[in-house]
């Protein structure tokens, strides 16, 4: 089990990313728009830099939904490899069976 503080920190990052997503997208569009004047583009980049760092989606860490483990996760299931194996072995994931040949 991961530290609760690390899980909470990641959840805070997810909330901030969701909160600032539209503002961040708008500022990025202005900054990339070649038809805008250089001053407007520069000001958009400055405003983008003023946003909280944790509001960036790249700072969100993919963690296991059950254990909070930060490594070895399957995006499709949002579970770590260990939790996925345990659930699959007990038959709690429909359609997933242990392979044998």
Image (tube, rainbow, N blue to C red):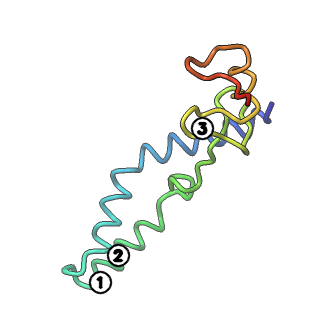
Q: Using residue 32 as the reference point, say whether residue 64 is left or right of it.
A: right
Q: How many marks?
A: 3
Which of the image's four quarters has the N terminus?
A: top right
| CA separation in Å, label 1 and label 3 | 36 Å
Decide: few, some or many residues near mark 3? Use Cα within 10 Å; few <14, some 14-19, many ≥20: some
| CA separation in Å, label 1 and label 2 | 6 Å
> Considering only vertical position in the picture, is 62 above or below 77?
below
Residue 41 image point, x, y percent: 31, 78
The local secondary structure at tag 3 comes to helix
| The label number, if any, that marks residue 43 in the structure image | 2
> Considering only vertical position in the picture, is 57 above or below 91?
below
Q: Using residue 100 as the reference point, say whether residue 22 is left or right of it.
A: left
| The label number, if any, that marks residue 82 in the structure image | none
The image quarter containing residue 33 is: bottom left
The local secondary structure at tag 1 comes to helix
Question: Marks 2 and 1: in contact by CB < 8 Å?
Answer: yes
Residue 49 image point, x, y percent: 48, 68
Label located before the other in sequence (3 or 2):
3
Which of the image's four quarters has the C terminus?
A: top right
Question: Marks 3 and 1: in contact by CB < 8 Å?
Answer: no
| The label number, if any, that marks residue 11 in the structure image | 3
Q: Which residue is mark 1?
A: 39
Query: Which residue corresponds to the image point at 48% horizontal and 48% vertical from the top-left?
Result: 17
Front disc: 3 or 2 = 3
Front disc: 1 or 3 = 3
The image quarter containing residue 63 is: top right
Residue 22 image point, x, y percent: 33, 51
| CA separation in Å, label 3 and label 2 | 30 Å
Residue in front for this viewpoint, 94 or 51: 94
Residue 32 image point, x, y percent: 31, 74
Q: Using residue 43 as the reference point, say whether residue 56 is left or right of it.
A: right
């Amino acid at each position: 089990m991961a530290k609760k503080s690390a899980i909470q920190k990641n959840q805070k990052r997810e909330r901030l990313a969701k909160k600032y997503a539209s503002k961040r997208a708008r500022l990025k569009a202005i900054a990339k728009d070649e038809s805008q004047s250089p001053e407007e583009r520069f000001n958009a980049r400055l405003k983008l830099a003023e946003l909280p760092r944790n509001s960036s989606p790249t700072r969100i860490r993919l963690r296991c939904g059950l254990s909070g483990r930060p490594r070895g996760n399957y995006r499709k299931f949002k579970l770590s490899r260990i939790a996925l194996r345990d659930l699959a072995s007990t038959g709690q994931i429909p359609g997933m069976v242990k392979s044998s040949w």
